[in-house]
Image (spheres, rainbow, N blue to C red):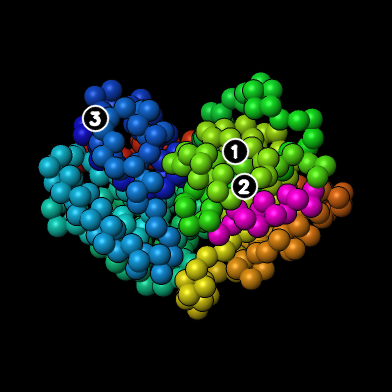
Amino acid sequence: MKYYLVAGEASGDLHGANLMKALKGLDPLAEFRFFGGDLMKAEGGELVKHYADMAFMGFVEVAVNLRAILKNLKACKDDIAAYQPDVLVLIDFPGFNLKIAAYAKTIGLPVNYYISPKVWAWNQKRVLKIKKIVDHLFCILPFEVEFYKSWGMDVDYVGNPLLDAITAFTPNTAFLQQNNLSGKKIIALLPGSRKQEITYLLPDMIAVAEQFKDYQFVIAGAPSFKVDFYNQFLKDNSIPVIFNATYDLLTNAHAAIVASGTATLETALFNVPQVVVYKGNAVTIAIARVLVKIKFISLVNLIVDRGIVKELIQEDCNEQKIAAELGAIVNDGAYRVAMLNNYDALDERMGQPGASAATAGLIVKYASKK
């Protein structure tokens, strides 16, 4: 069968790649065309547009880049029409992908949505629209099933694909030596994969490093950027930037400062104590605070429904408060152990690997019934 996948950010590229691998195992004749990234490209098929050209986040940022977004939407719709796939798989990225889903329904193409939109966070009535334009919705967070059920929508719970990625990961035993890292304990800096995230967060992360001279700070570089992009923030600071090795970095990290997003969950699953940070355009944050109806922003806290990692947002996301929380993590043994023990509750909620295989099996099953 011919598959068309749409992923618009780094996490979608990761999960899309693992899904493609699972689909190939079930469908040896699978052909792929996609919006995605380097990991999906490595699985074969045709990369139409890289997510680096698509990842705009926040109300103001979307408005400023509206022309580019509309251009990308048109290109995606036109390419789907020209390719005429048997199967459409939309991966997260709801601002873009729900519009593609609506278009797909107009041409009679069934919509598979992998990693359901987080409509439980704000404007929950969007579920009514999703019911109309999405044929098969695959959820990766355990509490989402009951949420959608409360709105009269049947969904498939497939487990979390991060468990697949982490299970498949083999640590590089020469990681420290190959990257000339000192014998000091490592603090991992994960400032995100979008330009605006990194621009807002990395300066404070670098400033914090100045207060912890006994530790080796290392930046996890996003694959869509070059080292020159990070150097503009580093200036004379000697913090190394390492690309395409985030899991190796977390394997060797003593603690981490992490941008809110998928990386917070990855960090916890690697059992690394962390402080979660987020900062954005002031207008965007103000609007979000009015609209968003959830207690936490990090996936770690959302899944266990309590604050097991500290979240520093906007005005609280500053050098002083980040340094204070990091200091507690590395210097207060009881505080550190408590966070690690709380990760056990997260592990229990997450379940077992197999999301990619489960989703692939359901996609093939539903496609065969067309």
Picture coordinates of residue 5, whole percent (x, y): 29, 42
- Residue at the extreme front of the image, as rendered: 236
Determine the CA span between mark 1 and mark 3: 35 Å
The residue at which mark 1 appears reads as 241
- Which type of secondary structure does the marked residue at label 2 adopt? helix
Residue type of the residue flagged with mark 2: Leu
The mark lying in front, picked from 2 and 3, is 2
- The residue at which mark 2 appears reads as 234
Q: Is residue 136 magenta?
A: no
Q: Quadrant of residue 312?
A: bottom right
Q: Nearer the viewer, mark 1 or mark 3?
A: 1
Give residue 31's mark: 3
Q: Which residue is nearer to you in this view: 267 or 200?
A: 200
Q: Amino acid at mark 3?
A: Glu
Can residue 114 be seen from the camera position used here? no
The kind of residue on which mark 1 rests is: Val
Q: Nearer the viewer, residue 89 or 329?
A: 329
Residue 199: x and y, percent? 53, 56
Along the line of sight, the residue nearer the viewer: 151 or 193: 193
First reached walking from the N terminus: tag 1 or tag 3: 3
**Mark 3 surroundings within 10 Å by alpha-carbon count, few (fewer than 14), some (14 through 19), many (20 or more):** some
Q: Residue drawn at (60%, 68%), measured in percent from left and top?
A: 314
SS state under label 3: strand
Mark carried by residue 60: none
Is residue 186 at least partly visible in the picture?
A: yes
Residue 97 vs residue 73, the one in the foreground: 73
Q: Which residues fall within the magenta stretch?
A: 200-212
